[in-house]
Image (tube, rainbow, N blue to C red):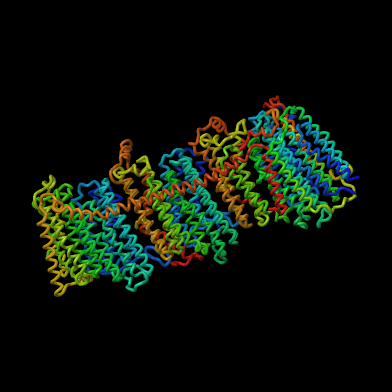
Amino acid sequence: MAAGNPWSAIWPEISLGCLALLLLVLETVLPRAAHGRIPLVSIAGQLGILVALAFNFDAPQRAAFNGLLMLSPHGQLMRAFFLISSILVSVLARHSLSWQRVPRVEFHHVVLVVAAAMMLLVESRNFVMLFVALETVTVGLYILVSYYRSNPKTLEAGLKYLVMGALSSALLLFGIVLLYGVSGSPGLAGRTGEAMQYAGLAGFLEANPNNFLAAAGIVLVLSGVAFKIGAFPFQIWIPDVYQGAPTPVTALLAVASKAAGFGVLLILVTEVFAPYAWLVGPVLTIMAAATILFGNLAALKQNNVKRLIGLSGVSHAGFILLAVVSAAREPMAIGAVYFYLYAYLIASFAVFGVMTVLAGPDDTEQELGDYAGLARESPFLAGVLACGLGSLAGIPPFAGFVAKLFVFVAAFKAGHFGLIAVAVAGVVISIYYYFGWIRMAYFDDEAAVSPKTAERARAGAGLTLGVALAALTLGSVVLGFYQGPLWSWVFGR
Amino acid sequence: MKPSLDAYVLLSAALFAIGFLGVLVRRNTLVIYMCLELMLVAATLALVAFSRFNGTEDGDVFVFFILTVAAAEVAVGLAIIVALFRARQTVEVDRLDSMKH
Amino acid sequence: MTPLNTALFVLIAPLASAALIMLFLGRRGAAASAVSVVTAALVACGALSLAFGGGRFTAAWEWLRFGSFAISIGFKFDDLAALMLSVVGVIGLCVHVYSLGYMSDDAGKARYFGGLSIFMFSMIGIVLADNLFMMFIFWDLVGFSSYFLINHWRERKSASDAAKKAFIVNRVGDFGFLLGIILCYRANGTVNLSALGADHAVYSRLIPLLLFCGAVGKSAQLPLQVWLPDAMEGPTPVSALIHAATMVAAGIYMLCRINVLMVPEAQSIITWVGTLTALYAALCAVTQRDIKKVLAYSTLSQLGYMVAAFGMGSVGAAMFHLTTHAFFKALLFLGAGSVILGCHHEQDIFRMGGLRTRMPVTFWTFTVAVAAIVGLPGLAGFFSKDAILVLALESNRAVFAVLAFTAILTAFYMLRLWKIVFLGAPHGESAQHAHDGGISLTAPLVLLAALSAVGGYWRAYPRAFEGVFSQIPEAQGATHAIVLAASIIVLVIGAGTALAFYATDGRDALEGKSRSVFGFLVALRTSFDTAYDYYVAEIQQRAAMVFNFIDVVGLAGVVVRGLAGATEFVGFGARALHTGRLNNYVYWFLGGVAVLWAFAAGVL
Amino acid sequence: MSAPAFDPLLISVAAPLAVALAIALGLPKRWAVKLAYAGFAVPALMALGVWWQFGSAAKETHGYAFLSRYSTGLDQFGIGLKLGLNGISLPLFVLAGLVGFAAGLYAIQSKAERMKTYLLLLLAMHAGLMGTFASVDVFFFYFFHEMALIPTFIMVGIWGGRDRTYAAMMMTIYLTLGATLSLVGLIAIYAKSGASSFDLMVLRDTLASRPLGEVTQEHIFGLLLFGFGILVSLWPFHSWAPLGYGAAPSSAAMLHAGVLKKFGLYGLLQIALPLLPLGAAHWSHTLAVVAAVGNVLAIGLVTMAQRDLKQMVGYSSVMHMGYAFLGIAAGSVLGAGGVVMLMVAHGLSVALLFLLSTSIYHRTRTFDMEKMGGLAQHAPVLAGLFVAATFASAGLPGFANFWGELPIFVALWNFSHVLTVTALTGTVISAIYGLRAAARVFFGPQSTAFAQVAAANPPSDIGWGEKLPALVLIATLLFVGIWPKSFSAAINRALTNTPAAMVASR
Amino acid sequence: MDQIAFISLSVLALASALGVVLSKNAVNGAMCLLLCLAGIAGLFVQLHAYFLAFILVWVYAGAVVALFLFIVMLLDMQGGRPWRFRAAQAFAGFMAAALLLVGLDLLAVRGRLGAGPNVGQAAVGSSLKLYAYQLFTTYLLPVQVMGFLLLIAMLGVIVISRRIGGAEDSR
C-alpha cells in the first residue's frame, strides 16, 4: 500500500464498500435458495477485513485527500471498533431477521456502508467531509431503525429518529456555517479561507479566543454532536427510538453511533475548540453531570429493557463525557475514553445478544418480567447477561470496572471533583437497575417464567451468535484481569 | 447600495428560526418535514452569503453536498412517512406516542 | 521437680483434665469423674508441697506485645499465694471427692467434672498470677466456670437465669476492675504485682476503688450481692467450692494482692462497704427458708467481714478469716448437701427436722461448723473473727458496733438453722427416710470438720504462711478483754435467742409472732432484686426498645427507605418526561440550544 | 521481582477460581462437589502453611514476605498483580482461609438447592477474599474485594431467607456506595501522591518522603473513612448489616461478616493510617465518638432488643465493629494491633455464630428466640458450641476476641477517658444479650412452640457436617486465645516497622 | 436596485416560510415552501451563485417539493385535521421563536460581521466549471461517499415503502 495513493490509505473503508456492493451483486446473481448464505459472506468478509486491519495496525499518522482525512493510531482504534461493532450487528441481525418478513441482504449492505462511513467520520478533518460522512451514517440509520416496517412501533421510532436527527443535523450545519463565516471574516485577525479544514479553523480560533459568533457556532456544533452521543438534554429521543428499533440496530445506535459521536467530539475538543475551553469546558462538564444523573434516574424505574438499556447508555455517555472533559487537562483521559468505549462495546453487545435471542418477532416489547427464571431455562444466556450487566455496572472482574477506574483516575488528575461526586452517585443508582435485571434472571420467586421466554431460551442462540456471546463474555472477563493488549493499543502510541 | 452581509445572515437566521418554529408547533409530520428542509436551505443561504462576502470558496461547494444530502433525506423520510401512514392511518405526531415513559 | 515446674503442673493439670473430658469423655461420666478427681488430688498434693516446701519464686513469660505494651503470663508465688493455693487445693479436693458421691447419678456428670476442672484451672491462675492483666483473665474465667456450673441443670429456668445473672453482675464489677487495671497501667506503666510500688500517681484514689469494683462483683458485696443467693441453683458441691470457699473469696485475695495501691480514703469506703454487706446479709439470712440460701447469705456476711478487715488495713486478718471461713463454710455447704441429698432434694428447712439421729455424721460435722462460724471459743471462726473485731475496735468504733451486732445475728440465724434442721421431729416424708451418704460424702465432711476445729491455731502451722499470718492483729490488754467479752456475749445473746425463739414445729416462729419484722426483713432481702428487676425491665429494656425503634423505624425506615423512595420518585419523574410526543422532544432541543447559546453569550 | 516457582498466595487465589471455572463450564454435580472440597481446602492449607512459615520467612521486603508479581499489562500505571503478606495481612489471610474452609464445608453439607451455582459463587467469593488480603497492589486489593462482594448479593438474593430481595438490593446499593467512595479515595491517593503507582510499597515510600498536605490528607481520609466505614457498618451506615445478615444464607453470611467485612478495617489500617497520618489525626475524634456512642452503645442496646437470633448476631457484629473503629481512632501501635487481633477473632466467632444459628434454625424452624427454649436437652454439643461462641464474642479470655478488645481499651484510655468508659460498658452489654440469647435458645424448659416443632421433627444433635466447620473455627479461636503471640508477634513487627507508623502509646 | 431586489426577495422568502408554518393544510404548505425556495434561489442569483440557484430550483423545487406534493396527494390528507393554534402550545412555541430571534439578533449585533466587503471576485458557485473542478479534486472523496449515500437511500426507500407481504419477503 503505497503512501502516495490516497485511496490506499482508506482501504478498510473501500473494502467495506466493495463488500457491500458484492452483497447486492450476489443477491442478483445467486439463486434464491442460496440467499440465506449471503449474510455469512458479509460476516466472513468483515472478519477478513478485521484480520487484515489487525495485521496492518501500526499505521503512521498522516493526512490524506488534501487534508480531508487524517489517519492516526486513534483512527485505527476506532476503525477496529466500528468493524467489530458491525460484525456483531451482522451476527445479531442474522438471528433477529429470521423472525421478520423483510429483505435481508439490504440490511447487511446498509450496515456495511454505515460502518465505513463511521470510520470516515472519525478520520475526517474537514467539515464538509464530516457532514457528508455524518449524513451517510444518519441516513443509513434512518433506514435501519425503521427496517422492520411491518411493525408500526418500529416505523414510529424511525420517524422520531428521522425528525430529531434532521433537526440536529440542521443545528450542526448552522453551527458549521457560522464558524465558516466568522473565520472568513476579513476584519478579524487570523482570517482564513480554509475554515472547512479543522486545522484552518483551529488557527482562526487560536487568534480569536473570544469571538461571540464563533462561540455560537461552537455550541451549535456541540449540540449536533450531543445528539449523536445522547448527552443531556439531547438524549430525550433515546428511549423511544431504542425501543422501536430492531434490537441489532439498537445495538448499533447505542454502541457504534455513540462511539462515532465521541470520536468526533474528542477530536473537536482537543484539536479544534481548544482555545474555547472557557466555553467547552463548563458546557461539557454540566452536560456530563446532567447526563449521568438523568440517565440513571430515568432508568431507575424503567421496566422495558430496551428503554432501560438506552437510558443506561445515556449514563454511560455521561461517564465518557467525564473523560472527554478531563482530556483537556490530562492526556491519559483520551486513553480512558477509548478503553471505556471498548469495554462498553463488549458488555453492551453481550446484553444485546441476549435481548435479541429473547426478543422474538415483536422486537419492541420486552419487559423485565420476561427475564424471570432465565437462569433456570438457560444458564448460558443468564450467565452472559449477568456478566454483561456486571461489566456495564462497572464491577470487577469485568472490563467495565477497569474502564470506570481509568475514567475516575483521569477525572481526578484533571481535578473534576464535583463530577466525580456525581459519578459516584450515578454508579450507586445504576447498581439498582442493573441488579434489578440480574435479580429477575436469577432470583426466581419474582414471577413465573413466561412460556414465551422459556421457549426462546431453550431454542438458544444458535452457533454463530452463541460463539459471539461466549467470546464477548470471555473478553469482558479477560479484559478485567489482563488489560495489557488493549491498553497498549490505546496508549502504547 | 448593496445589501450587507449582516442582512443576509439575519435573513438566513430568521428562516432557520421559522423552520424551527414549524417543527415545534406543527403536528403534521409532512409539514414538520418541510420545515426541516427549510432549515437546511436557510443554512445554505448563509453559507453562500459568507462565501461571497468573505471571498472564500469552500462554502459554495458545501452547498452542493447539503442539497444532495437533503434530497436523499427527503426520499428516505417520505418513505418512512408513507409506510407509517399505511400502518397507522395518520401522520399526526401527537397520535404517534405508542412508545413513551 | 522444681517449684516452678510444680506450679506449672498445678496450673496446667486441671486444664488438661478439662480438655480431656470435653473432647473425649463427654459421654463417659465415670471416666471423667475419675480423671477429674485424680487431677484434683494431684493438684492438692502439688499445692501443699509448694506451700510447705518453702519455695517462693517469681517467673514470667511474655504472652503478647504491641509496641511497648506487653502482657505476660507469670507466677508470683509468695506466702499469700501459698496460703490461697493450699486452701484452693484442699477444699477443691474435698469437693471433688464429695462430688463423686453427690453427683453419681447425674446425667451430665462428665460435663460437671469438666466444669470443676476448668474452675480449678482458673482459680489457680488467679492465685498464681503475677500481674493484674493475667489476674483479670483468670478472673473472667472463674466467672465463666461459675456460669457453667450454676447452669448445670440446664432444663431449669431458674438455674439458667441464675447463671446468667451471676455472670452479668460479675461483668458489671469487672467493668470497674478492668478500668482500674487500665488506669493502673497508664499511671504506673506496669501492672506487675511485684513492680507496683506505692508511688502514687494521678489517679491514685480512683485506682484502688475501681479495682475494688472487681472484688465487689466477685465477692458479692453491696450493691452487687444479688447474684450469690441465686447462684445456689447450682449443685451444692459447686456452691461449697465456688460460692463459699474459693471463688467468692478471690475478691479478698485480689485486694490483698494490690494492698500497696491502697490509700486511706479508699480504705474507709471499702471498710464501710464490707461492714454494711455483713450486716445486710445477716439480716437477710434470718428469714430464709432455703437451707442453701441461708448459707449463701451467711457467706455474704462473712465476706463482708473480710472486706471490712482489709479495709481497716489488715491483710492478715482478712486472709485469716478467709482461710477459716473456707473450711467451715465449705463444711456447712457440704453438710447441707448431705442433708439435701438425704432428704431427696428437699431444701426447705421447715420440711426437715429431726435429722440429728438419722444423719449423725452430718449432724456432728455440721455442728462443728456452726460452732466455728458463730465463734465458739476454741474453734477456727473464733480466732479469725476475733482478729477482725480487735481491728475494728482499734480503728473504728462504729464499724465495731455493726460487726458485733452482725455477730449476734450470725449466731442467731445459724442456730435457727441448726435447730430447725436437726432437732425436733421430721416434718416431711423425705426427712423421715433421710440417712447419711457413703464414704465419699462423709470423708470430706470429717476432714473439713477437723480443719474447722483446729484451723484457727495459726501458730501451729509451719512457718509457710508467716508472711500473711504475721500481719494478724493481736489484741493486748484491755482491748483483748473487751473483744473476748464482747464475742462471748454476742454469742450467748445470739445463740440463746435463737434457741429460745424458734420451735421445731415446722413453722417460722418469727413469721408467726411478728409479721411486721418478718415482712420488713423479707422486703429488705428482696429490695435489691426488685430494684434491679425494675431497672432491667423498665429502664434498660425500654431503652433498648426505644433505640431499636429509632434504628429500625427511624434510620433503616425513614432515612434509608425514605432516601430510596425519594430517588425512586425522582426516577418516576424522569421517566415520565418521556412523553412519546415529538413536539415535546423538540422543546428539549430548543431548551438545550438556548442554554448553550446563553453560555456562549456569557449570559450564564 | 519475578514469580517464584511455588507461590502459595497465587495458588490460594487460583485454586477456588479454577474450581469455580470448572463448575461454570458444566462439571457434573457429583464431581463439582468433590472438586469444591479441594477448592476450599487448598487455600486453607496454604494459609496454614504461610502462617507456619511466616516467622522464618527471612526474605522480607518492606516487611512483606512471599512476594511475587505478575504483570497485567498496566505496568505504566503502576498496576500489577503483586502478592505478598506482611504482619497485618497475614492474620487476615489465615482468617480468610479458615473461615472460607468452614463456610465451604458447611455449604457442601447444607444440601442447598441449585448446589452447583451456590458452590460456584461461594468459590468465587473465596478466591476474592484470598486475593484481597494477599494483594500488595491497592488496585487488586479493591478488585478482589469487589469480586467477592458481588457473589454475596446474588447468594442473598437466591438462597436468602425472609425479605431476601429487599435485603439483597439494600445491601448491594449500600455496599456499592461504600466501595465506590473508598475507590475514589484510593484513586485520590494514587493521583495525589505522585507515585503513579498503586503498589502499596511504592506509595508508602513516596509518601514517607513526600507526605501529602494536611488538607488533602483530611479530605482523602474522610473519603476513605466513610467509604470503608459503610463497608464495615459504621454507625449510622449500618442498616444493611442486620437486614442483610438476617436474610443471607449461612455460608455467605459467614464469609461476609467473618472475612469480607474486614476489608474496610484492613484498608484503614494498612493504607489509610500509614499513608495519611494527619488525616487520621483530624478524623479520629469524630470517628471515636461515632463508634463509641453509635456502634457500641446505641447498637448494643438495639442488639438487646432483638428477638430474631440471626438479626441479633448481625447487630452484635455491628457493635463489635465499633471496638475496631475505636482501636483505629486510638491510632497507636497498641490500638492497631488490637484491631487486627479483633478482626481475626471477630471473624472467626461471628462466622461460628452464623453457622450455629442456622443449625439452630434447622432444629427449631424459626429464628424467633421467643419460640425456642430447651434445645440443649436435644442438642448438647450444639449448645456447648453456641455458648462457647457467645462467650468468645463477649470477649471472654481464652478466646481470641479478648486479645483484640483488651489492647483496644488500653490504647483508648490515652485517647479519651470518657470514650473508654463508654466502650467498656459494651463488655457488659454484649454479655447481657449473648447470655440472654443462649438462655432463651438452649436452657430452661421447652417453650410450647418449640415443643410442637420438636414433637413433629425430633431435633438431633449436630452431625459431623456441621460440627467439623464449627470445630475448625472454635479451635482457631482457642488457639489464638491461648497463644496470641502466634499472630501478635507478626502484627507487632509490621506495625512498629512501618515507616510512617504513628507514635506508639500516645 | 440591489437593495430593492434583496428586500423584496427577503420578504417573499420570509412570508412564504411563515406560510409553511401557518398553512392550514399540507398542500398549501408545500406551495409556500416552493415560493420560499424561489425567493432563496433569487438571493443566490444576487450573490452570483448561479449554479447553486439552478440546482436549488432543480433539485428542490423540481424534485423535493414535487415529491412532497405527490405524497400529500397519495396520503390524501386534505381531509385531515386542520392545524390550529392551541393556546398553551402556541404560546410556548412563540416564546421559543422569540428566544431564537433574540439569539439571532445577538448574533448579528455582537458577532461583528458587518465589516466584510462584498469581494468582487467570482465565486465558485458562479460557474459550473470552477465548481466541478473543486468537486472532483479537493472534494472527490465526499462525492464518492455521496454516491454510497444515495445508493443506500434508494435501497432504503425500496425496502421501507414496498408493500408488506410481497413474495420477496419470505425466506
Where residue C228 sits in the image (x, y, percent)?
25, 56
Say if A33 sits above or below D429 in the image. above
Where residue E35 sits in the image (x, y, percent)?
83, 36
Question: Position of D263 compared to A136: left or right?
Answer: left
Say if C268 sits above or below A314 in the image. below
Say if C346 sits above or below C202 in the image. above
Q: Nearer the viewer, residue D317 or D108?
A: D317
Residue in the picture at 17% in, 72% down: C474
Where residue C366 sits in the image (x, y, percent)?
13, 57
Q: How many marks?
A: 0
Where residue A131 sits in the image (x, y, percent)?
76, 44
Quarter of the figure that contains the C terminus of chain A: bottom right
The residue furthest right is E1
Question: Position of C93 compared to A237: left or right?
Answer: left
The residue furthest bottom is C477
Question: Position of C430 compared to C524: left or right?
Answer: left
Q: Nearer the viewer, residue C518 or C119?
A: C518
Q: Is residue C440 visible?
A: no
Say if D468 sits above or below E17 in the image. below
Q: Is residue C34 visible?
A: yes
Q: Quadrant of residue C263?
A: bottom left
Question: Position of D269 compared to C193: left or right?
Answer: right
